[in-house]
Image (spheres, helix red, strand yellow):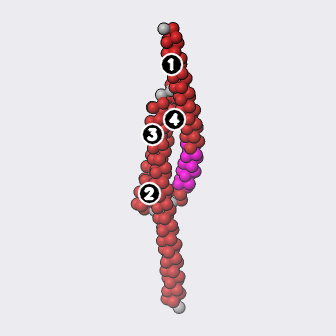
């Protein structure tokens, strides 16, 4: 009977060691994933800051420009807010992952990892939409600049004709 109990406890110990090894491995993997997400988040934040600065400069350069420019500005602002919300959500999920890592809840951690990947995909999509909107804004800006140059040229021509007519009338 003593031998049977000892064998039972040995099996239980082996099972616990195996479970501990798997949990340790999962924890190490999730820690590596968290580090990778942090790196990606930092990269996205850096790119977002560059994009914000560029777009802010573009907006400042294109003040005015009519309804289309106003609409593009609103869309860009909306996309910026969405990107910030998604970044906040990723940070929240990363915090949850850290909490789960310490309590070894593997299934919840995997679910959060999946959700985090989905959020990263959503951020990429939102950034893509932002780039498209900014490209459209830039195209509209170029059209307005061209129209402005043409108008200036026509005004100059009219001024020249006016001067010639004034000269002709005075002679």
Residue at the spot 53% in from the left edge and 28% down from the top edge: 23
Examine the rendered structure and indicate whether residue 169 appears above or below residue 87. below
Examine the rendered structure and indicate whether residue 13 appears above or below residue 76. above
Residue 137 drawn at (x, y percent): 47, 60
Residue 65 drawn at (x, y percent): 46, 62
Calculate the distance from the C-alpha at mark 2 to the C-alpha at mark 3. 30 Å
Calculate the distance from the C-alpha at mark 2 to the C-alpha at mark 4. 33 Å
149 or 109, which is in the foreground?
109
Mark 2 or mark 4: name the one nearer the start of the chain.
Answer: 2
Disc 2 versus disc 4: nearer the observer:
4
Mark 2 crowd level (few <14, some 14–19, many ≥20, 10 Å Cα) = some
User: Magenta region's main secondary structure?
Assistant: helix
Q: Identify the residue position indicated by label 2 in the image.
A: 72
Residue 60 drawn at (x, y percent): 53, 56
Q: Identify the residue position indicated by label 1 in the image.
A: 12
Mark 4 or mark 3: name the one nearer the start of the chain.
Answer: 4
Q: Which residues are magenta?
A: 41-57
Q: Identify the residue position indicated by label 4 in the image.
A: 94
Disc 3 versus disc 1: nearer the observer:
1
Dot 4 and dot 3 residues touching (CB under 8 Å): no
Residue 58 drawn at (x, y percent): 53, 57
* Residue located farthest toward the top when viewing the structure as drawn: 2
Is residue 73 among the parts visible in the rendering? no
Mark 3 or mark 1: name the one nearer the start of the chain.
Answer: 1
Mark 4 crowd level (few <14, some 14–19, many ≥20, 10 Å Cα) = many
Q: Identify the residue position indicated by label 3 in the image.
A: 115
Helix, strand or loop status at disc 2: helix
Is residue 100 among the parts visible in the rendering? yes
């Amino acid at each position: 009977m003593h031998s049977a109990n000892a064998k039972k406890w040995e099996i239980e110990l082996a099972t616990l060691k195996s479970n501990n090894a798997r949990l340790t491995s999962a924890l190490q993997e999730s820690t590596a994933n968290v580090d990778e997400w942090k790196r990606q988040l930092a990269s996205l934040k850096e790119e977002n800051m560059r994009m914000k600065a560029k777009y802010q400069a573009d907006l400042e350069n294109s003040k005015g420009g009519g309804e289309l420019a106003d609409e593009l500005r609103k869309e860009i602002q909306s996309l910026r807010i969405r990107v910030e919300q998604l970044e906040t959500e990723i940070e929240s999920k990363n915090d949850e992952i850290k909490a789960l890592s310490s309590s070894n809840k593997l299934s919840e951690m995997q679910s959060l990892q999946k959700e985090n990947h989905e959020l990263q995909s959503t951020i990429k999509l939102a950034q893509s939409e932002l780039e498209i909107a900014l490209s459209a804004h830039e195209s509209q800006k170029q059209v307005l600049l061209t129209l402005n140059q043409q108008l200036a040229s026509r005004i100059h021509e009219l001024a020249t004709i006016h001067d010639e007519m004034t000269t002709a009338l005075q002679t």
